[in-house]
Amino acid sequence: MEKEGQKIMVAVDESQESMYALSWCLSNLISDTSNNILVLLYVKPSPSVYSSFDIPGNIFSSDAVGAMEKFGRDLAASVMERAEAICSNSNASNNMKMQRVIGSGDAKNVICSAVQKLEADTLVMGSHGYGFLKRALLGSVSAYCSKHAKCPVIIVRHP
């Protein structure tokens, strides 16, 4: 029986930064000689709590809610297809098992939870390269995960 390699989780989204981080991971962390498991994790924003009325009192039709849910599913599928295309064009794809995971909710919490639940050995994330002010106002998912994930975190900055 072959020895299992590292379980490496890469958080992907629709950004160039996350796809670059995936490419970097495939080039630098996944070797041709080990049986690595690559976990592609995409986190959909949590569906808002839909009520019969939104704040101004307008009625949300079930068609609008259905359209928003379909858009979320289509976006997740599109991101995963892009990520899998990058993986299949990689030299490391021969000795690599791939797993797709799609979560829903607050990205930083879902990512840290998935790391723990799936027992990832390493988490790889892209950095959007926000400046101090924007990072202070919006928060940084990668900074949060680097402090709270239960494994080493590699944050890859897009050149």
Image (cartoon, rainbow, N blue to C red):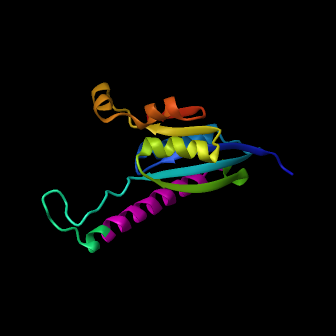
> Where 137 sits versus 63, above or below?
above
Left or right of 18: which side holds 27? right
x and y percentages locating residue 43 in the rendered image: 45, 51
x and y percentages locating residue 36 in the rendered image: 70, 46
Left or right of 45: which side holds 32? right
> Where 158 sits versus 3, above or below?
above
x and y percentages locating residue 52 in the rendered image: 23, 67
Front residue of 16 and 105:
105
Q: Is residue 157 visible?
A: no
Residue at image x 55%, y 33%? 154
x and y percentages locating residue 86 in the rendered image: 55, 52
Residue at image x 47%, y 39%? 126
Left or right of 19: which side holds 52? left
State the extent of the magenta-drawn residues as a range.
66-91
Q: Quadrant of residue 98?
A: bottom right
Residue at image x 13%, y 62%? 57
Q: Does the magenta portion include 1?
A: no
Front residue of 147 and 122:
147
Q: Is residue 92 visible?
A: yes
**Residue reaching furthest left?**
56
**Residue reaching furthest bottom?**
63
**Residue reaching furthest front?**
52
User: Looking at the magenta stretch, what is its main secondary structure?
Assistant: helix
User: Number of callouts in the render?
Assistant: 0
Q: Does the magenta portion include 68?
A: yes
